[in-house]
Image (cartoon, coloured by chain):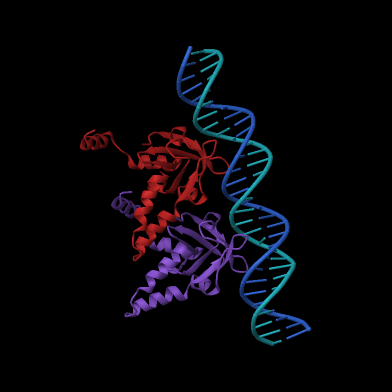
Chain colours: A purple, B red, C cyan, D blue
Amino acid sequence: MFIGEYKHTLDSKNRVSMPAKFRDDFGGSFVMTKGLDNCLFIYPIEEWENIERKLKDIPMTNKDARAFVRFFFAGATECEIDKQGRTLIPSNLKEFAKIDKDVVIIGVSTRVEIWSLEEWNRFNSDANITYEEVAEKMSQLGI
Amino acid sequence: MFIGEYKHTLDSKNRVSMPAKFRDDFGGSFVMTKGLDNCLFIYPIEEWENIERKLKDIPMTNKDARAFVRFFFAGATECEIDKQGRTLIPSNLKEFAKIDKDVVIIGVSTRVEIWSLEEWNRFNSDANITYEEVAEKMSQLGI
DNA sequence: GTGCTTATACTCACCTATAAACATCAATAT
DNA sequence: ATATTGATGTTTATAGGTGAGTATAAGCAC
């Protein structure tokens, strides 16, 4: 289970250091792909294989489903973590996520997400979660 | 069950000593998250795992749900208590709770809360609970 | 009250993670 | 061949995290 929020930066070669707490939970490599809300999703290999299995079963009969499957598969890249704990962000994904230099890396349960700092701030102000809503959700869930 | 109120301070490395009465009830480590009303929530591991299970099943299909799940997972950090009974407050949570140096740590049933002293005072004067209200609540609950 | 014990606060020293600068190498284009 | 680009590797500095020791304060027994 991935949790936590980390502010990191890209170096001039588009590499970013993966938070040390996350490294061990990937077996050295993982899959990075286009995510929802202009962020990047990162899945450990086993988790990605589960997703592949599920996506394989989606019927190709409707256009939205085909678009979604293409979005997910075409965006995916297998990435590695080097000896210094860094990983390269492929240029197409970097562009997709509007990443310049400052990024926020968060743990979200079974996956890790990489956000450009600007997009992360925008998402949080757009979503604009109020305490009342959070409290209500928590109450619903019995937390 | 956690009860009581303690005034403590952060050291220069953002560590605070956990009240001795609470230490044994965490198994050495626990999870700290963003809470309601600008305080931090601390859950024992088992309690947090219950929450994780509930959150994992929330569908990712709507934006508010994604925001809520990200708020919880990204806001969470697993913390440890060192041999001197101290624990580190991660910088993003410190900032979230507007903590400078003086904090109030309170026991609230299944969780512990950490407040900045200023926010705690403000909350209590804002909430402005009267004895009559307390008495009515107690009566409702049959206390 | 006195003295003992424990909790909290503070200081110093060390270690690890991150950021940044620079070097190497292969592939490609000029 | 030379320059350029992208990928990979190495080194160093700094900041943040971790650990240990001491001092002060609070609680408790006598």
Q: Is residue A81 left or right of residue B127?
A: right
Decide which of D16, B131 is in the foreground and name it. D16
Q: Residue at x 40, y 75 (%)?
A: A69
| The quarter of the displayed image where residue A59 is located | bottom left
- In the rendered image, residue C13, in percent from the top left (x then y), is placed at 69, 40
Q: Residue D26's x, y, as percent?
A: 48, 26
Residue A100 relative to residue A57: left or right: right
Front residue of this view, candidates B122 and A49: A49
The C terminus of chain B - image quarter:
top left
In-front residue for pair B9/B142: B142
Depth check, front residue: B132 or B74: B74
Q: Vertically, is B135 above or below D1?
A: above
Query: Which quadrant, please, contains the N terminus of chain B?
Result: top left
What residue is drawn where x is 46% and y is 58%? A107
Looking at the image, residue B8 lies above or below residue A101? above
Residue B134 showing in the rendered view: yes
Q: Is residue A130 visible?
A: no
Give percent across and percent down for residue A128: 38, 59
Q: Quadrant of residue A54?
A: bottom left
Answer left or right for D13 relative to B102: right
How many numbered tags mark residues here? 0
Percent coordinates x, y for residue A93 in the rendering: 51, 72
Residue at x 21% of width, y 34% of height: B142
